[in-house]
Amino acid sequence: MTEKDSNVEESVLEAEQASQVELDSEQISPAEKESVLAEEKGLSTDVDIPEMTASDDEKSAFFEQWKARHQAYLAHKDDADIQAVDEGQTEQKNPEAKKSKRVLFQGINRRQESPESKTETEKKVQPLKVDIPSKVVWKAIPVLVTSLLLAALALYFISPTSKKKQIEVVGNERLTAEQVENYSLISPDDYIVTIALHADAYAKNIKKNSSSVETAIIKFQFPATFTIHIKEYAIIGYIQQQSQWYPVLSSGVVGGEPISQDSLPEGYTTINLSDKELIKELAIELGKIDAGIRSAIQTINLTPSKVTADLLTLNMADGNTVLVPLSEISQKLPYYTKIAAEVTVPTTIDMEVGIYRYAS
């Protein structure tokens, strides 16, 4: 290789590097760069690059031809720079007249999308809508509703609200509301739903645990109120055992908590019977008559005769005395009110056989 050939190759490389720097500074597209470099290198089929074994004349001719092309490119570039400056001034005056197309070589055009084409493209890219059949929707609704109800119930039972309740007691005379609530066995930890569903069982607990309660009913008021309606057995009288007094209920039960004589109510009835079966029968019979007549009895004693083994003597608060068989109290004693209103002095009313009276 001759020195002249080396100089030619170095000149070609320097020219290519200079063209590359100029193209980068213009910030044109890769396609434009490739076209420019191809034209400067002479790869466009117009001129063939001579081989290294070519003669010096051929190499000199190629170099002269390339030099002429390069000078033409530089002149064209200067004209393009002047035109770009003019266009920049025009854009400052009228921004709407901005041009995005740079014409350096023929055959290079940049494609611009119009607003209409962008809108069409966006419409094409819209997601596909899937229509769900109405039958599927209607079949899914019961499942969704059931799931929501179960979730709501679960949250309700987890929350403290499910156990927060209010209990009221109605009809109690001797028992306190707290006692009745304790007899029912209702616990603070019991759920409201559980008590509402098993109200009868809790009511039975009251009767089972207290001999004083005749009836018990539990009613539920939404959202969390329970009302316990009770009716207590009437107290027929009191029996003295040693120094304590025990009430005798209309159910025939004797017991409960003992009370002292000082705690006895005013106008109480003293029952002087020792046989438990007779006491129970007496209590049941007296429980059938009017409370006004019962409250007028001061003492009850067993005074059997030759004819009537269960004959009772009742000493009344108005001074009268009544003789009546225990088994016939509920039939004959109701007449006492009418007879007592007719007498003016203490009188004995004999109801053992028939009914007649005489002065005591």
Image (spheres, helix red, strand yellow):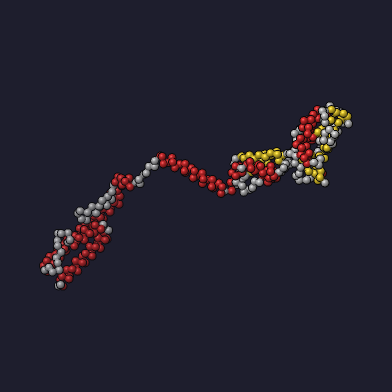
Left or right: 195 with respect to 314?
left
Residue 307 placed where, x, y %?
84, 33
Q: Quadrant of residue 315?
A: top right
Q: Between 197 and 38, which is closer to the camera in this rendering? A: 197
Residue 22 placed where, x, y %?
24, 61
Residue furthest to the front in view is 306
Can residue 235 be seen here? The reply is no
Which residue is at a point 27% across and 58% down the rendered structure image?
Answer: 27
Q: Quadrant of residue 261?
A: top right
Residue 75 placed where, x, y %?
19, 59
Which residue is at a point 84% across and 27% down the rendered structure image?
Answer: 356
Left or right: 107 with respect to 229?
left
Which residue is at a point 60% across and 42% down the rendered structure image?
Answer: 197
User: Is 252 located above or below residue 96 in the figure?
Assistant: above
Quadrant showing the N terminus = bottom left
Residue 70 placed where, x, y %?
18, 62
Quadrant showing the C terminus = top right
Residue furthest to the right in view is 360
Q: Between 97 and 360, which is closer to the camera in this rendering? A: 360
Can residue 128 be seen here? The reply is yes
